[in-house]
Amino acid sequence: MKNIILFIFILALLVTGCEKDEAPIDPKNAIIGKWEITHLGNGEDLEPVENSISYREYLPDSLLRFYNYEDDRFINRKYWIKDSLLIDSFWFIDDVSNDTITLENPYRFEFLNPNTLRLELQYPAIYTTSIYKRIN
């Protein structure tokens, strides 16, 4: 009888002792790195992206660099995290008015795991959902 009670006690310790409390992911640190798109679509209706033409690199100084493989060049933007949104901004000069126009793209973001990032564009678009994998 003692052996059965001891066995149950040890088994209970093993079961409860093996549970891991995962620390929440800090998005300001987790976003840093190079990310390549793997899926694109809307909501849960996503299609795999076979050959990505670019990657995005989030740097610690709020610089977002898009690298195009074919053109072998970077396009720079700024990014920041506010509440539950990842926002990137870029500017261009209007050909007609010569005014500088700044656009912001807000994304709801979720780390599916430390190496998988889901972005949901908050503006209407042809494709609003994208999944990225870390490549470095």
Image (spheres, helix red, strand yellow):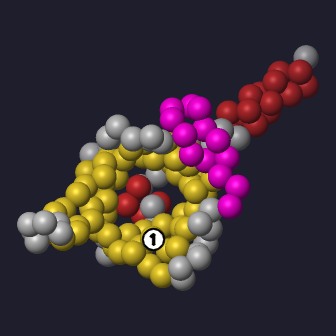
> Which quarter shows the C terminus?
bottom right
Q: Secondary structure at mark 1?
A: strand
Residue 50 colored in magenta in the image: yes
Left or right placement of residue 48 versus residue 11 in this view: left
Left or right placement of residue 123 versus residue 26 in this view: left
Give the x, y percent position of residue 83: 27, 46
Relative to 14, is 78 above or below?
A: below
Give the x, y percent position of residue 104: 25, 55
Residue extending farthest to the top is 1
Q: Residue at x 51, y 32 (%)?
A: 43
Report the number of discs. Answer: 1
**Main SS class of the magenta portion in the image:** strand
Relative to 87, is 108 above or below?
A: above
Give the x, y percent position of residue 101: 16, 63
Asked where in the image residue 4 lies, by quadrant, the reply is top right
Q: Residue at x 81, y 24 (%)?
A: 8
Q: Residue at x 91, y 25 (%)?
A: 3
Q: Amino acid at mark 1?
A: Phe
Q: Which residues are magenta?
A: 39-51
Give the x, y percent position of residue 25: 47, 52
Relative to 50, is 59 above or below?
A: below
Asked where in the image residue 15 lies, by quadrant, the reply is top right
Residue 136 appearing in the image: yes
> Which quarter shows the N terminus?
top right
Q: Which residue was labeled with disc 1? A: 66
Residue 115 appearing in the image: no
Front-most of residues 22 and 29: 29
Residue 126 colored in magenta in the image: no
